[in-house]
Image (spheres, grey):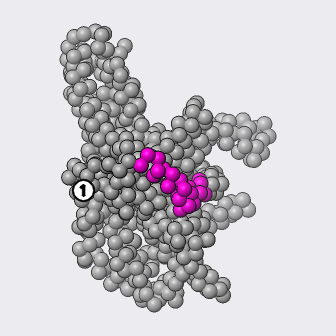
Amino acid sequence: MANGIGLIGRAGPQGRGALLTALIMLPPALAVFTLFVVLPIGEAAWYSVFNWDGFGIPTRFLGLTNYISVLGNTTFTSAVIHNFLIIGVSLALQLPLALGMALLLSRNRIGTVTFRLIFFMPYILADVAAGLIWRFVFDGDYGLVSGISKLLGGGPVYLLADPHLAFSAVLVVVVWKYFGFYMMLYIAGMQSIDRGLYEAAEIDGASALQRFRHITIPQLGPMIRLSIFFSIVGSLQFFDMIVPLTGGGPLNSTHTMVSFLYYFGITRMRVGFGSAIGVILFVVCVTFAFGYRRLFMRHD
Amino acid sequence: MAAAIARLAILALVAAIVLVPLLATAIGGFKDIGELRTHPFSLPSHWLWSNYWGMLTGHFYWRVLVNSLVIALLTVALTLIVSSLAAFAFAHLHFFGMRYLLNYLLLGLLFPAATAILPLFIKVRDLGLLNTYWGVILPQVAFGLGMSILLLRNAFKQLPHELLDAALVDGCGYFRYFFYVTLPLSRPIMSTVGIIIFVASWNNFLLPLIILNSESRYPWPLGLMVFQGQYSTAWQLVLAFITLTILPAIAMFLLAQRHVVAGLTAGAVKG
């Protein structure tokens, strides 16, 4: 039986009460959401076809010029490549590392809880703090990497000052910060696998590798697909850590899409240009989210 | 036996890579700049408490923490109120169009706040909220609504159906039911949502960076960047300041680890 009653359904005190309730309970959420999420997205599309400094009313109509100059900007294209590098490293290094650690820590043995806590700890730190910690680690004069290099008889290493190496350094921090979160997801997934499956496989003589390949991986499927989804979404919007680590430098060699938006659109108050970047990012994220869900997560 | 040792060796190695930067940061805050340069790995020859003590007795550190706390608590409170009301309606009331409204609110899950950040800045400015707490809080609430409503609605729906039917028959209205039955029975999910929203607000950087422009209102991530900008040549002070600012999060994490881990992962999975 339905609780709330349709408009045409049973009329009566409950029906009217339900309607009144809905009319009181829903508007706050709808208003806040419309004002601060939906309208800005729509306005981004509107502003993106103007040349506007944010004051008065946008009048200098440009058509698609902003989009053309964003897409033709070599710093932007390198930023897109960086976003894809983060995705690549997340999928090729971070998630396998997380899975490996989850396998070692899924069952309760001595020290398991402590290791889980340690690995999860970087995840709760703000990106800004993590970025600054690693800026110190990578610092050529005071940092740990240089320290190791000097211990081994080499000279100081200025990783973040080298346009060819700086982004690799950023990628290290990404893995360091986030693998523990995915490890926790995998552990949660592994703990809900029916132990009977493993026992049956063991009786049938399946090796550890076979059990991993034919039980753990398929049973973990939904969680793996989810973790891939999260790491791609996270990679696409990667920003906070760029500011403390490199600020996009040296020579604009470490931008991501959002840091490009920040340094080239927001700090210079180029509203039209920045909005065009936002719209591009929006299209990429929504297309990905819909496509991925439809293709890979239909049954999860 | 060999396998157990190999396992522990791998775990210890990864744990060392995770912990060394954190420990080096905390310990570096006890050194002076010369020792930091010459002995990056050793313990300080004498522990220099003045770096930390100077900040703890100063004004700036407490100011940014209080700002972060106020913004985070108000964000959590407002998100919980607004989203639990909406989630209740979506869980129990079935009018034409409710599905569309729900899907509308869930659109927010598909893209990050960064996509609309410039128009958001202009909106907040036009509302006169630039450089105020509310200019940060309201957009944070708006972007947290989708996930909160989804989690709360799923939880509300799982409460036994018969309870509501019986209550309605006995003349209890929806609002009383909401306050006296739904909310008390939903404390675990409310605290999960609260933790997720709190952590997101506590660590938020981009939004306050754009909305706030006076240091007296900066939350700690912005304060950290300001401090680093001012003392960029004095790493020992920056390290001490980083340590002090991440301390509350780490302390909270260690005290309530079960809730934090379960909350943050469950939020991801169910959302």
**Of the residues shown, which amino acid type is indicated by label 1?**
Leu
Q: Quadrant of the N terminus of chain A?
A: top left
Q: What residue appears at the point 25 percent right and 52 percent down from the top-left corner?
A: A56
Q: Quadrant of residue A217?
A: top right
At which x and y percent is residue A121?
48, 60
At which x and y percent is residue A143?
52, 79
Q: Which residues are magenta?
A: A62-87
At which x and y percent is residue B256?
39, 54
Q: To which residue does mark 1 refer?
A: B130
Picture mark count:
1
Which one is in front, B92 or B179?
B92
User: Is residue B113 highlighted in magenta?
Assistant: no
Q: Quadrant of residue A138?
A: bottom right
| Residue A271 in view in this figure | yes
Label 1: chain letter: B
- Relative to B175, residue A87 above or below: below
Q: Residues within 10 Å of mark 1 (few under 14, many from 20)?
A: many
Q: Quadrant of residue A201?
A: top right
Q: What residue appears at the point 38 percent right and 47 percent down from the top-left corner?
A: A61
| Residue B263 in view in this figure | no
Q: What residue appears at the point 52 percent right and 87 percent down from the top-left corner?
A: B39
Which one is in front, A266 or A46?
A46
Which one is in front, B86 or A199?
B86
